[in-house]
Image (cartoon, grey):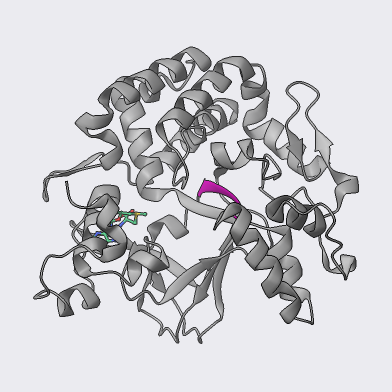
Amino acid sequence: MDVEVRYIDDSKGNGLFAKKNFSEDSILFEESPLVCVQFSWNAEYGYKACDHCLKPLETAEENVRRLTGKTEIVLPYPELCTTNKSTITQCSGCGVEYCNADCQEKAFNQYHRTLCVQTGPLQCLNDAWKQIHYPPETGNVMLIPRILATIQQSCDKENTLNRFLKFCHRSVNDDSHLAHKLLGEKFANQISTLHSLLVQSMPHEHVSQLLSPEGFQSLLALMGTNGQGVATSPFSQWVENVPEKDLVSKLYEDMDANVGSFLDNEGVGLFETQSAANHSCLPNAEIVYRHNNSTLSLRALRDIEAGEEICISYVDECTLSSSRHSRQKELRENYLFNCNCPKCLEQADDPDVTSDEDMSDSDE
Ligand SMILES: C[S@@+](CC[C@H](N)C(=O)[O-])C[C@H]1O[C@@H](n2cnc3c(N)ncnc32)[C@H](O)[C@@H]1O
Protein backbone atom coordinates (compact mmCIF):
# COMPACT_ATOMS: atom_id res chain seq x y z
CA MET A 1 0.00 0.00 0.00
CA ASP A 2 1.23 3.48 -0.83
CA VAL A 3 -0.72 4.97 2.09
CA GLU A 4 -0.47 4.36 5.84
CA VAL A 5 -2.61 4.89 8.92
CA ARG A 6 -0.91 7.00 11.62
CA TYR A 7 -1.97 8.39 14.98
CA ILE A 8 -2.33 12.19 14.88
CA ASP A 9 -3.56 13.35 18.29
CA ASP A 10 -6.23 12.59 20.87
CA SER A 11 -8.74 14.86 19.23
CA LYS A 12 -8.44 13.63 15.64
CA GLY A 13 -7.36 10.08 16.44
CA ASN A 14 -5.80 8.31 13.45
CA GLY A 15 -5.43 9.67 9.94
CA LEU A 16 -4.37 8.42 6.52
CA PHE A 17 -1.03 9.55 5.06
CA ALA A 18 0.63 9.31 1.64
CA LYS A 19 3.82 7.21 1.55
CA LYS A 20 4.83 8.54 -1.87
CA ASN A 21 4.03 11.44 -4.19
CA PHE A 22 0.76 11.17 -6.11
CA SER A 23 -0.14 13.29 -9.10
CA GLU A 24 -3.58 14.82 -9.58
CA ASP A 25 -6.19 12.27 -10.76
CA SER A 26 -4.08 9.25 -9.85
CA ILE A 27 -5.57 6.41 -7.80
CA LEU A 28 -4.09 6.16 -4.30
CA PHE A 29 -5.55 2.71 -3.56
CA GLU A 30 -8.55 0.48 -4.15
CA GLU A 31 -10.40 -1.53 -1.57
CA SER A 32 -13.46 -3.79 -1.21
CA PRO A 33 -15.73 -3.27 1.79
CA LEU A 34 -15.68 -5.56 4.81
CA VAL A 35 -19.48 -5.44 4.53
CA CYS A 36 -21.90 -3.41 2.48
CA VAL A 37 -25.65 -3.29 1.92
CA GLN A 38 -28.05 -1.53 -0.42
CA PHE A 39 -30.22 1.21 1.09
CA SER A 40 -33.69 -0.05 2.00
CA TRP A 41 -35.79 2.47 0.06
CA ASN A 42 -33.41 2.25 -2.90
CA ALA A 43 -34.10 -1.50 -3.12
CA GLU A 44 -37.82 -1.04 -2.51
CA TYR A 45 -38.11 1.47 -5.36
CA GLY A 46 -36.72 -1.11 -7.80
CA TYR A 47 -33.05 -0.11 -8.10
CA LYS A 48 -31.71 -3.54 -8.96
CA ALA A 49 -28.27 -4.37 -7.57
CA CYS A 50 -26.27 -7.46 -6.58
CA ASP A 51 -27.08 -8.20 -2.93
CA HIS A 52 -23.36 -8.61 -2.20
CA CYS A 53 -21.39 -6.11 -4.32
CA LEU A 54 -24.12 -3.69 -5.56
CA LYS A 55 -23.19 -4.22 -9.21
CA PRO A 56 -26.18 -3.24 -11.35
CA LEU A 57 -28.48 -6.08 -12.41
CA GLU A 58 -30.31 -4.00 -15.04
CA THR A 59 -28.99 -3.15 -18.47
CA ALA A 60 -28.41 0.55 -19.23
CA GLU A 61 -31.52 0.50 -21.45
CA GLU A 62 -33.73 -1.04 -18.74
CA ASN A 63 -32.32 1.48 -16.30
CA VAL A 64 -33.12 4.45 -18.54
CA ARG A 65 -36.62 3.16 -19.27
CA ARG A 66 -37.36 2.77 -15.55
CA LEU A 67 -35.85 6.10 -14.53
CA THR A 68 -37.57 8.09 -17.31
CA GLY A 69 -40.84 6.11 -17.16
CA LYS A 70 -40.54 5.80 -20.97
CA THR A 71 -40.69 2.14 -21.90
CA GLU A 72 -40.27 2.87 -25.63
CA ILE A 73 -36.70 4.20 -25.35
CA VAL A 74 -34.14 2.23 -27.34
CA LEU A 75 -30.56 2.97 -26.29
CA PRO A 76 -27.98 2.86 -29.07
CA TYR A 77 -24.59 1.20 -28.56
CA PRO A 78 -25.95 -1.65 -26.35
CA GLU A 79 -22.45 -3.16 -26.45
CA LEU A 80 -21.26 -0.29 -24.19
CA CYS A 81 -23.42 -1.59 -21.36
CA THR A 82 -21.39 -3.83 -19.04
CA THR A 83 -24.29 -5.63 -17.31
CA ASN A 84 -24.18 -9.35 -18.03
CA LYS A 85 -27.62 -10.67 -17.19
CA SER A 86 -26.73 -14.23 -18.12
CA THR A 87 -24.56 -14.63 -14.99
CA ILE A 88 -27.20 -13.41 -12.50
CA THR A 89 -28.00 -15.98 -9.80
CA GLN A 90 -30.63 -16.14 -7.08
CA CYS A 91 -30.60 -17.56 -3.55
CA SER A 92 -32.98 -20.54 -3.53
CA GLY A 93 -33.77 -19.85 0.13
CA CYS A 94 -34.79 -16.19 0.18
CA GLY A 95 -34.70 -15.09 -3.46
CA VAL A 96 -32.08 -12.32 -3.25
CA GLU A 97 -30.12 -11.84 -6.47
CA TYR A 98 -26.40 -11.70 -7.18
CA CYS A 99 -24.44 -10.55 -10.21
CA ASN A 100 -22.78 -13.96 -10.45
CA ALA A 101 -22.17 -17.27 -8.65
CA ASP A 102 -18.92 -15.97 -7.18
CA CYS A 103 -20.67 -13.15 -5.31
CA GLN A 104 -23.38 -15.57 -4.15
CA GLU A 105 -20.77 -17.94 -2.76
CA LYS A 106 -18.79 -15.14 -1.07
CA ALA A 107 -21.98 -13.78 0.55
CA PHE A 108 -23.09 -17.24 1.70
CA ASN A 109 -19.72 -18.06 3.23
CA GLN A 110 -19.33 -14.65 4.87
CA TYR A 111 -22.82 -13.89 6.33
CA HIS A 112 -25.73 -15.11 4.25
CA ARG A 113 -25.80 -18.69 5.66
CA THR A 114 -26.84 -17.12 8.99
CA LEU A 115 -29.10 -14.38 7.66
CA CYS A 116 -31.01 -16.33 5.00
CA VAL A 117 -32.89 -18.37 7.63
CA GLN A 118 -33.83 -15.14 9.47
CA THR A 119 -35.45 -13.48 6.46
CA GLY A 120 -38.85 -12.91 8.19
CA PRO A 121 -37.55 -11.22 11.38
CA LEU A 122 -34.97 -9.25 9.39
CA GLN A 123 -37.74 -7.98 7.12
CA CYS A 124 -39.46 -6.55 10.25
CA LEU A 125 -36.21 -4.78 11.17
CA ASN A 126 -35.93 -3.41 7.63
CA ASP A 127 -39.56 -2.19 7.68
CA ALA A 128 -39.03 -0.44 11.02
CA TRP A 129 -35.89 1.26 9.67
CA LYS A 130 -37.74 2.48 6.57
CA GLN A 131 -40.35 4.15 8.76
CA ILE A 132 -37.56 6.03 10.55
CA HIS A 133 -35.26 6.86 7.69
CA TYR A 134 -36.89 8.20 4.53
CA PRO A 135 -34.84 9.12 1.42
CA PRO A 136 -32.32 10.61 0.98
CA GLU A 137 -30.78 7.67 2.84
CA THR A 138 -27.38 7.97 4.51
CA GLY A 139 -27.11 4.73 6.48
CA ASN A 140 -28.89 1.43 6.86
CA VAL A 141 -29.45 -0.60 9.99
CA MET A 142 -29.30 -3.75 7.82
CA LEU A 143 -25.51 -3.37 7.78
CA ILE A 144 -25.53 -4.48 11.43
CA PRO A 145 -26.88 -8.04 10.88
CA ARG A 146 -24.20 -8.42 8.18
CA ILE A 147 -21.51 -7.33 10.65
CA LEU A 148 -22.77 -9.71 13.34
CA ALA A 149 -23.18 -12.67 10.95
CA THR A 150 -19.69 -12.03 9.50
CA ILE A 151 -18.27 -12.40 13.02
CA GLN A 152 -20.38 -15.49 13.71
CA GLN A 153 -19.40 -17.25 10.49
CA SER A 154 -15.71 -16.36 10.73
CA CYS A 155 -13.12 -19.09 11.47
CA ASP A 156 -11.28 -16.54 13.63
CA LYS A 157 -14.12 -14.79 15.44
CA GLU A 158 -11.95 -12.78 17.83
CA ASN A 159 -9.85 -11.34 15.03
CA THR A 160 -12.94 -10.52 12.95
CA LEU A 161 -14.64 -8.86 15.95
CA ASN A 162 -11.48 -6.78 16.50
CA ARG A 163 -11.41 -5.71 12.85
CA PHE A 164 -14.86 -4.16 13.36
CA LEU A 165 -13.98 -2.69 16.75
CA LYS A 166 -11.03 -0.88 15.14
CA PHE A 167 -13.51 1.42 13.37
CA CYS A 168 -14.14 4.37 15.65
CA HIS A 169 -17.46 3.65 17.34
CA ARG A 170 -17.97 6.16 20.12
CA SER A 171 -21.51 7.54 20.31
CA VAL A 172 -20.49 10.70 22.19
CA ASN A 173 -17.47 12.97 22.07
CA ASP A 174 -16.91 13.92 25.69
CA ASP A 175 -14.29 16.60 24.88
CA SER A 176 -16.66 18.56 22.69
CA HIS A 177 -19.90 17.50 24.44
CA LEU A 178 -21.28 16.12 21.18
CA ALA A 179 -23.65 13.15 20.83
CA HIS A 180 -24.49 11.43 17.58
CA LYS A 181 -27.66 12.79 15.93
CA LEU A 182 -29.10 9.28 15.49
CA LEU A 183 -28.74 8.55 19.18
CA GLY A 184 -30.33 11.70 20.59
CA GLU A 185 -33.41 11.85 22.83
CA LYS A 186 -35.59 12.45 19.78
CA PHE A 187 -34.90 8.95 18.48
CA ALA A 188 -34.80 7.06 21.82
CA ASN A 189 -38.05 5.10 21.23
CA GLN A 190 -37.15 4.27 17.65
CA ILE A 191 -33.69 3.06 18.66
CA SER A 192 -35.23 0.87 21.33
CA THR A 193 -37.64 -0.65 18.75
CA LEU A 194 -34.81 -1.32 16.30
CA HIS A 195 -32.75 -2.87 19.08
CA SER A 196 -35.55 -5.29 20.11
CA LEU A 197 -36.13 -6.30 16.49
CA LEU A 198 -32.42 -6.91 15.97
CA VAL A 199 -32.18 -9.00 19.15
CA GLN A 200 -35.14 -11.11 17.96
CA SER A 201 -33.71 -11.64 14.50
CA MET A 202 -30.13 -12.70 15.26
CA PRO A 203 -28.57 -15.69 16.99
CA HIS A 204 -26.63 -14.33 19.99
CA GLU A 205 -23.67 -16.71 20.00
CA HIS A 206 -20.29 -14.88 19.98
CA VAL A 207 -21.88 -11.42 19.57
CA SER A 208 -23.87 -10.99 22.79
CA GLN A 209 -21.77 -7.94 23.81
CA LEU A 210 -22.81 -6.18 20.57
CA LEU A 211 -26.46 -7.08 21.10
CA SER A 212 -26.71 -5.28 24.47
CA PRO A 213 -28.35 -1.80 24.30
CA GLU A 214 -24.89 -0.18 24.61
CA GLY A 215 -23.38 -2.54 22.04
CA PHE A 216 -26.17 -1.70 19.60
CA GLN A 217 -25.65 2.04 20.14
CA SER A 218 -21.94 1.67 19.45
CA LEU A 219 -22.72 -0.25 16.24
CA LEU A 220 -25.06 2.55 15.13
CA ALA A 221 -22.33 5.08 15.92
CA LEU A 222 -19.81 2.93 14.03
CA MET A 223 -22.09 2.88 11.00
CA GLY A 224 -22.90 6.58 11.32
CA THR A 225 -19.31 7.80 11.57
CA ASN A 226 -17.62 5.30 9.20
CA GLY A 227 -20.33 4.17 6.80
CA GLN A 228 -19.29 5.19 3.29
CA GLY A 229 -21.91 5.70 0.59
CA VAL A 230 -21.63 3.35 -2.39
CA ALA A 231 -23.20 4.18 -5.75
CA THR A 232 -23.42 2.18 -8.98
CA SER A 233 -25.30 2.80 -12.21
CA PRO A 234 -25.53 0.93 -15.53
CA PHE A 235 -26.56 4.12 -17.31
CA SER A 236 -23.73 6.33 -16.07
CA GLN A 237 -21.20 3.69 -17.05
CA TRP A 238 -22.76 3.56 -20.53
CA VAL A 239 -22.59 7.39 -20.64
CA GLU A 240 -18.86 7.33 -19.85
CA ASN A 241 -18.23 5.12 -22.86
CA VAL A 242 -20.66 6.65 -25.36
CA PRO A 243 -19.07 8.83 -28.07
CA GLU A 244 -22.03 11.18 -28.72
CA LYS A 245 -22.41 13.02 -25.44
CA ASP A 246 -25.25 15.26 -26.65
CA LEU A 247 -27.40 12.12 -26.80
CA VAL A 248 -27.45 11.96 -23.04
CA SER A 249 -28.57 15.41 -21.89
CA LYS A 250 -32.20 14.88 -22.97
CA LEU A 251 -32.24 11.49 -21.21
CA TYR A 252 -30.95 13.12 -18.01
CA GLU A 253 -33.67 15.79 -18.28
CA ASP A 254 -36.34 13.08 -18.60
CA MET A 255 -34.93 11.20 -15.63
CA ASP A 256 -34.79 14.36 -13.56
CA ALA A 257 -38.46 15.03 -14.32
CA ASN A 258 -39.42 11.50 -13.29
CA VAL A 259 -37.20 10.56 -10.33
CA GLY A 260 -35.28 13.75 -9.47
CA SER A 261 -31.73 13.11 -8.34
CA PHE A 262 -32.25 9.43 -7.42
CA LEU A 263 -30.42 7.87 -10.35
CA ASP A 264 -28.06 5.35 -8.77
CA ASN A 265 -28.15 2.05 -6.94
CA GLU A 266 -27.10 3.27 -3.53
CA GLY A 267 -25.93 1.68 -0.33
CA VAL A 268 -23.42 1.93 2.47
CA GLY A 269 -20.20 0.02 3.17
CA LEU A 270 -17.44 -0.25 5.76
CA PHE A 271 -13.92 0.09 4.36
CA GLU A 272 -10.95 -0.57 6.63
CA THR A 273 -8.36 1.73 5.03
CA GLN A 274 -10.63 4.49 3.72
CA SER A 275 -12.28 4.80 7.14
CA ALA A 276 -8.98 6.15 8.50
CA ALA A 277 -9.27 9.20 6.22
CA ASN A 278 -10.30 12.34 8.12
CA HIS A 279 -12.50 15.11 6.79
CA SER A 280 -11.43 18.44 5.32
CA CYS A 281 -13.63 21.09 3.68
CA LEU A 282 -10.68 21.43 1.27
CA PRO A 283 -10.17 17.72 0.51
CA ASN A 284 -7.19 16.47 -1.47
CA ALA A 285 -8.84 13.15 -2.41
CA GLU A 286 -12.25 11.82 -3.37
CA ILE A 287 -13.97 8.45 -3.48
CA VAL A 288 -15.02 6.99 -6.81
CA TYR A 289 -16.49 3.64 -7.89
CA ARG A 290 -14.70 2.96 -11.17
CA HIS A 291 -15.68 -0.70 -11.38
CA ASN A 292 -19.41 -0.11 -10.99
CA ASN A 293 -19.52 -2.27 -7.87
CA SER A 294 -18.68 -1.72 -4.21
CA THR A 295 -14.90 -1.64 -4.81
CA LEU A 296 -13.86 1.85 -3.79
CA SER A 297 -11.03 3.85 -5.36
CA LEU A 298 -9.47 6.91 -3.72
CA ARG A 299 -8.51 9.49 -6.35
CA ALA A 300 -6.19 12.46 -5.85
CA LEU A 301 -7.95 15.80 -6.44
CA ARG A 302 -4.56 17.52 -6.72
CA ASP A 303 -0.89 16.58 -6.46
CA ILE A 304 -0.20 15.04 -3.04
CA GLU A 305 3.28 14.84 -1.52
CA ALA A 306 4.71 11.90 0.44
CA GLY A 307 3.96 12.45 4.13
CA GLU A 308 0.87 14.62 3.52
CA GLU A 309 -2.38 13.72 5.27
CA ILE A 310 -5.03 12.44 2.87
CA CYS A 311 -8.41 14.01 3.58
CA ILE A 312 -11.78 13.48 1.95
CA SER A 313 -15.03 15.37 2.36
CA TYR A 314 -17.64 13.74 4.59
CA VAL A 315 -20.35 16.05 3.26
CA ASP A 316 -21.82 16.27 -0.24
CA GLU A 317 -20.85 18.96 -2.74
CA CYS A 318 -23.84 21.10 -1.92
CA THR A 319 -23.00 21.22 1.81
CA LEU A 320 -19.31 21.66 1.00
CA SER A 321 -20.08 24.90 -0.81
CA SER A 322 -22.43 26.12 1.93
CA SER A 323 -21.54 28.39 4.87
CA ARG A 324 -19.01 27.33 7.53
CA HIS A 325 -21.87 27.25 10.02
CA SER A 326 -23.89 24.76 7.90
CA ARG A 327 -20.90 22.51 7.26
CA GLN A 328 -19.89 22.45 10.91
CA LYS A 329 -23.44 21.72 12.04
CA GLU A 330 -23.62 18.63 9.81
CA LEU A 331 -20.15 17.44 10.85
CA ARG A 332 -20.91 17.88 14.56
CA GLU A 333 -24.25 16.06 14.38
CA ASN A 334 -23.09 13.15 12.24
CA TYR A 335 -19.36 12.84 12.94
CA LEU A 336 -18.97 14.35 16.41
CA PHE A 337 -16.21 16.86 15.77
CA ASN A 338 -15.63 20.56 15.30
CA CYS A 339 -13.89 21.06 11.98
CA ASN A 340 -10.65 23.06 12.13
CA CYS A 341 -9.61 22.57 8.52
CA PRO A 342 -7.86 25.49 6.74
CA LYS A 343 -11.12 26.61 5.08
CA CYS A 344 -13.03 26.62 8.40
CA LEU A 345 -10.18 28.51 10.10
CA GLU A 346 -10.10 31.07 7.29
CA GLN A 347 -13.87 31.57 7.66
CA ALA A 348 -13.80 31.55 11.47
CA ASP A 349 -15.00 35.17 11.67
CA ASP A 350 -17.94 34.62 9.28
CA PRO A 351 -21.33 35.13 10.96
CA ASP A 352 -23.04 31.95 12.25
CA VAL A 353 -25.65 31.79 9.51
CA THR A 354 -27.19 28.76 7.92
CA SER A 355 -26.97 28.65 4.13
CA ASP A 356 -30.22 29.19 2.22
CA GLU A 357 -30.28 25.59 1.03
CA ASP A 358 -30.31 24.41 4.62
CA MET A 359 -33.05 26.67 5.89
CA SER A 360 -35.63 23.86 5.87
CA ASP A 361 -33.32 21.94 8.19
CA SER A 362 -32.33 25.02 10.15
CA ASP A 363 -30.83 25.06 13.62
CA GLU A 364 -32.83 23.47 16.32
C1 LIG B 1 -14.10 7.72 9.62
S1 LIG B 1 -13.36 8.20 11.11
C2 LIG B 1 -11.83 8.85 10.56
C3 LIG B 1 -10.66 8.23 11.27
C4 LIG B 1 -10.55 8.54 12.73
N1 LIG B 1 -9.82 9.77 12.95
C5 LIG B 1 -9.93 7.40 13.52
O1 LIG B 1 -9.15 7.65 14.43
O2 LIG B 1 -10.25 6.24 13.22
C6 LIG B 1 -14.35 9.60 11.45
C7 LIG B 1 -14.05 10.26 12.78
O3 LIG B 1 -12.75 10.86 12.76
C8 LIG B 1 -12.75 12.10 13.45
N2 LIG B 1 -12.44 13.17 12.48
C9 LIG B 1 -12.53 13.10 11.14
N3 LIG B 1 -12.13 14.25 10.56
C10 LIG B 1 -11.79 15.07 11.55
C11 LIG B 1 -11.30 16.41 11.60
N4 LIG B 1 -11.11 17.12 10.49
N5 LIG B 1 -11.06 16.94 12.82
C12 LIG B 1 -11.27 16.24 13.97
N6 LIG B 1 -11.73 14.96 13.99
C13 LIG B 1 -11.98 14.39 12.80
C14 LIG B 1 -14.15 12.25 14.02
O4 LIG B 1 -14.14 11.71 15.32
C15 LIG B 1 -15.00 11.38 13.10
O5 LIG B 1 -16.18 10.90 13.71
Q: Quadrant of residue 242?
A: bottom right
Task: Please say if 328 is above or below 89.
Answer: below
Q: Within the displayed image, which quadrant is ligand 1 positioned in?
A: bottom left
For the point 76% across and 68% down, the residue is 238
Residue 264 in sight: no
Instruction: Find residue 357 and report its horizontal and vertical position in percent.
Output: 32, 62
Residue 155 is situated, as x and y percent measured from the top left of the image, at 60, 30
User: Viewer-proximal residue, 66 or 300?
Assistant: 66
Q: Residue at x 33, y 63 (%)?
A: 278
Magenta stretch secondary structure, dominant: strand
Give the total of numbered labels.
Answer: 0
Q: Residue at x 48, y 12 (%)?
A: 200
146 versus 317 height, above or below: above
Is 133 located above or below residue 313 in the figure?
above
How far across and down, in percent of the image, does residue 13 sit? 26, 57
Magenta span contains residue 268: yes
Residue 148 in magenta stretch: no
Q: Is residue 71 left or right of residue 267?
A: right
Is 125 in front, or is 245?
245
User: In which image quadrant can residue 34 be found?
Assistant: top right
Q: Can residue 304 be seen in this view?
A: yes
As rendered, which of 97 and 16 lies closer to the eye? 97
Left or right? Give the position of 152 relative to 10: right
- Residue situated furthest top in the rendering: 200
Please report the bounds of the magenta region as a residue range.
263-269
> Residue 33's x, y, as percent?
56, 50
Quick check: 230 above or below 21?
above
Q: Which residue is drawn at 36% across and 27% down?
A: 216
Q: Relative to 333, is 262 on the left or the right?
A: right
